[in-house]
C-alpha cells in the first residue's frame, strides 16, 4: 500500500507545526513500528534540528532534491536516533525555491514527483510546512492527502484556520486533488482561559470529530526540542509525552 502523506500546516508562525510533525513522526516510527519519512520544507530547518540532526551538515537538502535533476531521494535522506524514522532536512536554500522553479509549468508537482520512490518504501510521509503560503506550501498540499492544522488558542487564531480551509479547498479544485482533506485540527499552546476555551469550542463545532484534545503549554516539550530530542527520548513519562501520544493516536486514527 502506498504511504500515507500527512502535512502539518498553518500559515501562521509558531503554532506547533514542527513540534507536532516531529513527535507524531517519531511516535509512529518508534512506538507503532511504521517506516516514517519526515520531510522538512521550512527554511528554518527546525524539523531536523529537533531530532538532533544538524541541517547545515548535510551536503544536499530538500532544496537540491527539488531543483537539481540528478539528486536522488536517498542522497538527501538522513537516519535519526529513532528507529524507522528518517528525515529530509531543509535549510535557508529553500527560500530560493519559488524563484528557481517559478517558470516551470509543473512547478507545483516537484515535491510529489521527487517523493515517488518513497511511496513504496515508507508507510508514512510527514511534511513540516513553513509559516507562509506560496509555492512551497502548494507543493506540500499537492503531495499530501491529509492535512493536520495546529491552531494556537490565542487571539486571531481562528483567522489562520479559516485561511487554511480556503487554501485546501482551492488546491483541491485547482489540481483536481479530491483526496486532499483536513483530517485533524489541534488546538495548541493551550492555557485554561476563557478565550482559549471559546476557541476550542468553536473548533469542535466547526470540525466535529476532527478536533483533537488541546495541546497544553508544557516546559518539557519546549526543553525537549531545544535539546534536539523527541519527547519520547527526553521525557517519556511527562505530561507532554501523554498529550503528544494522544495527538499521535488521533492522527493515526484519522487515516482509517
Ligand atoms: N506544548 C508546548 N508547550 C510549550 N512550548 C511549546 C509547546 N509546543 C511547542 N512549543 C514551543 O513553541 C515554539 C514554537 O513551536 P514550533 O516550532 O513547533 O512551531 P511552528 O508552528 O513550527 O513554528 P514556525 O511557524 O516558526 O515553523 C517552540 O519553541 C516550541 O518548543
Ligand atoms: Mg516550524
Image: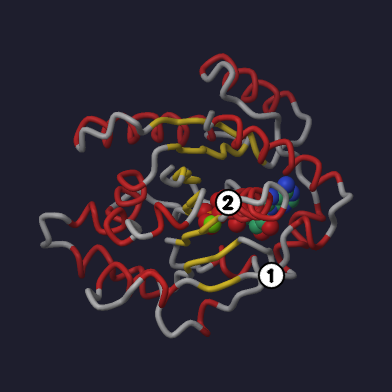
Please name whichever residue, 221 or 146, is drawn nearer the observer in this view of the structure. Answer: 146
**Which residue does the image show at 56% across and 49% down from the upper left?**
17
Q: Which mark is residue 21?
A: 2
The correct choice, above or below, for 121 with respect to 167 in the image is: below
| Residue 110, image quadrant | bottom left
**Which residue does the image show at 41% across and 35% down from the upper left?**
164
| Residue 188, image quadrant | top right
Mark 2 surroundings within 10 Å by alpha-carbon count, few (fewer than 14), some (14 through 19), many (20 or more) = many
Q: In this view, does 121 lie to the left or right of 201?
A: left
Please name whichever residue, 39 or 214, is drawn nearer the observer in this view of the structure. Answer: 39
Mark 1 surroundings within 10 Å by alpha-carbon count, few (fewer than 14), some (14 through 19), many (20 or more) = some
**Which residue does the image show at 20% across and 38% down from the upper left?**
175
| Residue 171, image quadrant | top left
Q: Mark 1 points at which residue?
A: 81
The correct choice, above or below, for 246 with respect to 62 in the image is: above
At numbered mark 1, what does the secondary structure look like: helix, strand or loop? loop
Q: In this view, does 242 lie to the left or right of 117?
A: right
Q: Is residue 138 left or right of residue 5?
A: left
Q: Name the spot of residue 130 as percent of width and height, x first.
A: 44, 56
Between disc 1 and disc 2, whose residue precedes? 2
Amino acid at each position: 500500500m502506498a504511504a500515507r502523506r500527512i502535512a502539518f500546516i498553518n500559515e501562521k508562525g509558531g503554532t506547533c507545526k514542527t513540534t507536532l510533525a516531529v513527535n507524531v513522526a517519531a511516535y509512529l516510527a518508534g512506538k507503532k513500528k511504521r517506516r516514517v519519512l519526515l520531510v522538512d520544507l521550512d527554511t528554518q530547518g527546525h524539523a531536523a534540528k529537533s531530532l538532533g540532526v544538524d541541517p547545515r551538515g548535510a551536503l544536499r537538502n530538500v532544496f537540491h532534491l527539488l531543483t537539481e535533476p540528478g539528486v536522488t531521494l536517498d542522497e538527501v535522506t538522513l537516519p535519526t536516533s529513532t528507529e524507522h524514522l528518517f528525515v529530509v532536512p531543509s535549510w535557508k536554500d529553500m527560500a530560493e525555491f519559488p524563484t528557481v522553479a517559478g517558470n516551470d509549468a509543473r512547478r507545483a508537482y516537484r515535491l510529489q514527483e521527487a517523493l515517488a520512490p518513497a511511496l513504496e518504501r515508507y508507510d508514512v510521509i510527514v511534511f513540516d510546512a513553513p509559516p507562509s503560503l506560496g509555492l512551497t506550501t502548494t507543493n506540500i498540499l499537492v503531495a499530501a492527502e491529509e492535512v493536520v492544522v495546529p491552531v494556537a488558542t490565542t487571539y486571531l487564531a481562528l483567522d489562520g484556520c479559516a485561511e487554511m480551509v480556503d487554501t485546501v479547498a482551492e488546491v483541491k479544485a485547482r489540481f483536481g486533488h479530491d483526496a486532499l482533506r483536513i483530517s485533524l485540527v489541534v488546538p495548541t499552546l493551550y492555557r485554561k482561559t476563557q478565550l482559549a476555551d471559546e476557541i476550542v469550542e468553536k473548533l469542535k463545532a466547526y470540525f466535529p470529530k476532527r478536533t483533537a484534545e488541546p495541546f497544553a503549554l508544557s516546559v518539557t516539550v519546549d526543553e525537549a526540542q531545544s535539546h534536539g530530542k523527541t519527547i519520547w527520548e527526553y521525557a517519556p513519562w511527562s505530561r507532554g509525552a501523554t498529550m503528544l501520544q494522544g495527538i499521535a493516536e488521533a492522527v493515526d486514527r484519522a487515516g482509517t
